[in-house]
Each structure stands twice: as structure tokens, then as C-alpha cells.
Amino acid sequence: MKLRLAMVFLLAIAAAALVSADEGELPKFGDALHGTQKYDDFERPEKCRQCHIEIYYQWDQSWMSKAYDSPWDEIEYFELAVAHSKKNPKFKPVADGCNGCHTPVAFMAGDTPPPRPSENSRANESVSCDVCHTITGYNESALFNFSYYVNPGRTKYGSRGGNNSPAHDLVKTDIHKAAKFCANCHNEKNPWGIWVKSTYNEWLEGPYSKEGVQCHECHMPKGEGRRALTDGKTYDDMRQHLFHGAHIESKTRGAIDVVVHPNMGEVPAGEAVTFFAHVFNQKAGHKIPTGSVEDRLLYLHVEAIDSAGTVYHLPVDKKGFEGEEYTIASKALAYQDFKEMMDLPAEWNGLPRDGNVPEGDRIFRMPYFDEQGNVTVAQWNTAKLGVDYRVGPREDKIETYTWEIPYEVAPGPVTITATLNYRLLVDSVARFLKVPEMYYKDRLINEYSTTIEVLP
């Protein structure tokens, strides 16, 4: 069954590349790009820096420049994906294909798996300047899994165009300013045909695409700047090569509004009050979380503090939808597929699915399942997706919290605070794999407080 699914996936990719003899042969894309170029066909980013100083340093601090050599990417790739592919050869093309987006130059050079980041090879360039600016198009029938066409050489392609420079020729394109350009790597299907990344699809199905708001408007905003030393002009609409997204704390802070209100203002001890927490995605053009959602944790924590300072944790009310148990924090175990990948002892039973998120908190997620039905963080090993309980663009999710006021609550004002937190990686997984704290520490998205009066 597994091999049949893999073959169906590969045949679908191959079919997308076929054209009639009258149309001519399309350039290579996707898996067919593997081994078609040499490292030296592409300019090093440091050469681009000689003229494009502002742009280079924007890129250099962005996650485009760290897509291969960041700590979690290295650990996930080598300790999980590559290790798994050695035990199960069907995953070898998938493990190689990771590099089509994380370090395209290495992938196109056929250098897979690339050297470890500590070896300081050209794979560490990650998504370099010359990769994007030698892309000439993309296969629109397969907008996922690095479906771009590339033509490295003296000619560089971009949305502004202009006069040729001493270093290269310029060709103006429309493709570089379209959201479809981003779909090449921000849409991904795995061997089961599962959309394990669907950021472009989420944008396409949401309100921003209908309004013509492209990905670039948020992730490459326009600002004043110079594009090159050889061009003496300052532009007021230069695309800033910041690529700031989920990894940047200032980008996620405030991305979602949180507001809480009670259904009554005064409550005697022993009676119930209900709080309504509104979680509104007012900023992102895609769902939150997006991208590698199997890694992410976005959770809402609600607590009450009485006038004596005693803290009471309020669990979310269940709504009763299918798969809801994966959206409410518990002590359930998951990630059992690590056992095969890492040769763990037979008695190893997994890790806490939700890490140390307080039991009863609402989690906005879409779980990924392996063939055995266990939650996994391995995209390549995902055979099924669970309920999609993420927050869509301009969506207002309303969570309720019914609290029967304990008799021991101190009379007087009680403050109820809702805190929305975000983690790049489930902390139980991060600690087990020795991933740096920055990936699993709580990041505050937003919070809001309201009060009620508890009557004596």
C-alpha cells in the first residue's frame, strides 16, 4: 500500500511535466532538477553583497539565509528524515527533496544529503539570492514541491527590471511579484499526496487573494532604499528582503486579537458564570499556525485571580466536534515513530503530545498522523491529517469557559485573563532532541483581562 501510494505520487508529478510535441519540452522542475546544475553555476551571496549591500543584509538576517543551517532544521533533517530514509528507502527521494527548498543549490548540484552545517559548505547558503533571481517560471499545474524553472547564468530576473549592470543583465518579470512564486516552497505534498504545507492554498482560498493582496505585501513590504551601488537612484517602493514570518517574534506578536467578556458582572459563590474568549486573526492572510503546522503549538490559557491572589485555571468548554480531543491539551502520548527513526528501545512509548501545556487549554492546530494513527512531527511520514482547528484569515473563533465559582473564592473583584501563546516546536519534542530553547519557549501573541464581582 505504501509503495503504491508513493508510485501514484511520483506518476502524478511526472504527468504534470508532460506536454505535446507541438508545445515543446518544458524545463525541468521538482525532483527532476536534482543533479542538473553545479554549485559554480550560481553566484555566492557574498558576491551579490558587493553591489546590493542593503538587500544582502536584509536577506542575511532573514530565515531565507538560515533555511538549511538553523538548529531545528539540522536536527530534524539529519536525526529524523535522513535516518529514517536509511531504514526505509522509500523515504530517500523525500529526504533529498527537502533540500529543493531548504538549500536549492545543493539539491540542484545533486549534493544530497548535503554536508552538515558545521562543515561550512555551500549548502549553508540556504535560499540564496541567485536561486530566486535565476528562476524563470514555475509549473502552474504543480504549484508545490519546488516547481520552479531555473536558468543560472549572467541574466538575472526580477520584478523591477531596468538597465543592465556591469555584473549581469536584467530581465523584468511578472512572476516574481505573484503569490504563485511563493507556492513553490510554501505548498508541499508528501508521498501519500497529503498537503503537509498549504500556506499558498490557504491564502488562495481566503479573502486576501480575492482582494489582490499578495504574500509580498506582508513578507516583503515596500520601503525606501537603493537596489545597488551601480544605480544611484533611491526608490520609495523597494521591496525589502526581510521575509519575516513565524520565526520573528515581532511578526507574530499581535497577529491575533484576544478579547474576553462574561455573561454577567456579579456572581454569588457556588453559581456558574460563562466567559467568551474571541480569537480573531486580523493580520495574517493565511491560517495561524501555517507552514510546518505539525511542529507548532498555538494555545489559549485562561485563568482567574481572586482578590486574595489565588489563581484558578479554567479549562475550555468542549464543543463536541470530531477530533476535538487533539485540540484540548492533555497528557496523551505521541511521536511514537521516533522509535523506528532513532532505534529507540522497544519499551519507549512516546512523548507528551502537548508538552507542558496546561491540561484543558484550547490548542489551535491540525494534527498529523502516521500509518499507525499516532501523532507525528514527520511530514514525510504523515499518512493522514486530523481536524483543522486553526484560525483562518479574518476568522473569529469563540471559545467558552464555564466556571462554577468555588465557595473558597475571596469575595470582591476577580480578574480573568486570557493569554494566547505560540511555540515553534512542541517542548517535549524539543527537549528530547536537544533543540535550543528559542524553539519551544512560550511566545506571547496577545492577552486580555476582564473582571467580575464575586458576591459574599
Image: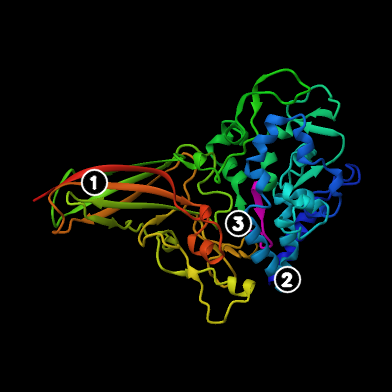
Reading the chain from its start, which is encountered first: label 3 or label 1? 3
293 magenta-colored: no
Q: Position of residue 38 (x, y in %)?
A: 86, 49
Q: Nearer the viewer, mark 3 or mark 1?
A: 3
Q: Which residue is mark 1?
A: 415
Q: Position of residue 111 (x, y in %)?
A: 81, 57
The magenta stretch is 186-194
Residue 91 in the image: above or below residue 50: below
The residue under the point 67% across, 60% down is 77
Q: CA distance from mark 3 to mark 2?
A: 20 Å
Label 3: few (<14), some (14–19) or many (≥20) C-alpha neighbours in 10 Å: some
Q: Amino acid at mark 1?
A: Thr
Residue reaching furthest top?
Answer: 233
Q: Amino acid at mark 2?
A: Lys
The secondary element bearing badge 3 is classed as helix
Q: CA distance from mark 3 to mark 1?
A: 38 Å
Answer with left or right where residue 154 lies relative to residue 187.
Answer: right
Q: Position of residue 135 (x, y in %)?
A: 78, 39
The secondary element bearing badge 2 is classed as helix
Q: Which residue is mark 2?
A: 86
Q: Amino acid at mark 3?
A: Trp
Q: Position of residue 121 (x, y in %)?
A: 77, 52
Total marks in image: 3
Q: Which residue is mark 3?
A: 72
The secondary element bearing badge 1 is classed as strand
Reading the chain from its start, which is encountered first: label 1 or label 2? 2
The residue under the point 42% across, 63% down is 325
Answer with left or right where residue 28 lies relative to residue 129.
Answer: right
239 or 375, nearer to the observer: 239
Label 1: few (<14), some (14–19) or many (≥20) C-alpha neighbours in 10 Å: some
Image quadrant holding the N terminus, namely bottom right
